[in-house]
Image (spheres, rainbow, N blue to C red):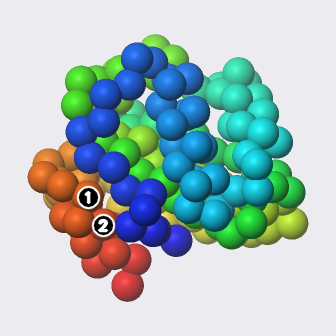
Amino acid sequence: MFDKQLTFVNKTFKDKADAINFLIHEAAAAGKLNGGEAYRKSVLQREEEFSTAVGYEVAIPHGSSDDVTESFVAVSTVKKPILWGEESIRMIFMIGVPEHKRTREHLQILAWLSRNLMHDEFRNSVVNAGNEIQLFECLSRLEQ
């Protein structure tokens, strides 16, 4: 689910749109998206319906489309908190799944993330990761 190429530490974003665009660009560069425009529309549509800020300074933008070639979770911590809807966030977990896996796989990933994000220890290890390798190792330990 996690990929070293899609883990980022202490990124600086102007706003929510900047963060979403960056993570989509990186997912496409990593081969997880074929183009990515349909996926971008899916993520932005979800954000218009309801903010994906979930508390604990975390946002989980997500979407599904046919241009997602492989399910992924792109993760970034932010250097300076940004406003995501009405909440200030420091951690972003962007989920992408192919349209045909939308129901089952999407919900499994969301449930897994939600269970782990409830634990202070996990959130602290994510937000305090000093570099991408530490962040990826933190995520990989939980995935096992």
Tell me: 96 left or right of 113: right
Residue 58 placement: quadrant: top left
Q: Foreground: 87 or 15?
A: 15
Crowding around mark 1 (Cα neighbors within 10 Å: few <14, some 14 to 19, many 20+) is some
Q: Residue at x 13, y 52 (%)?
A: 130
Residue 10 in the image: x percent, y percent?
24, 39
Tell me: 71 left or right of 23: right
The disc label shown at residue 72, or none: none
Q: Check disc 1 and give the amino acid type.
A: Glu
Q: How many marks?
A: 2
Identify the residue under disc 2: 136
Residue 77 in the image: x percent, y percent?
30, 42
Residues under numbered marks 1 and 2 in contact, where contact means CB atoms less than 8 Å apart: yes
Crowding around mark 2 (Cα neighbors within 10 Å: few <14, some 14 to 19, many 20+) is many
Tell me: 124 left or right of 119: left
Q: CA distance from mark 1 to mark 2?
A: 6 Å
Q: Quadrant of the C terminus?
A: bottom left
Q: Check disc 2 and give the amino acid type.
A: Phe
Residue 60 in the image: x percent, y percent?
51, 43
Q: Residue at x 55, y 34 (%)?
A: 20
As helix, strand or loop, the secondary structure at mark 1 comes to: helix
Asked whether the viewer can see residue 118, the reply is yes
As helix, strand or loop, the secondary structure at mark 2 comes to: helix
Vertical relation: 86 (above or below) 18: above
Q: Residue at x 58, y 43 (%)?
A: 25
Q: Foreground: 94 or 35?
A: 35
The disc label shown at residue 132, or none: 1
Q: Residue furthest bottom?
A: 144
Vertical relation: 101 (above or below) 19: below
Q: Residue at x 28, y 24 (%)?
A: 81
Residue 37 in the image: x percent, y percent?
78, 39
Vertical relation: 138 (above or below) 52: below
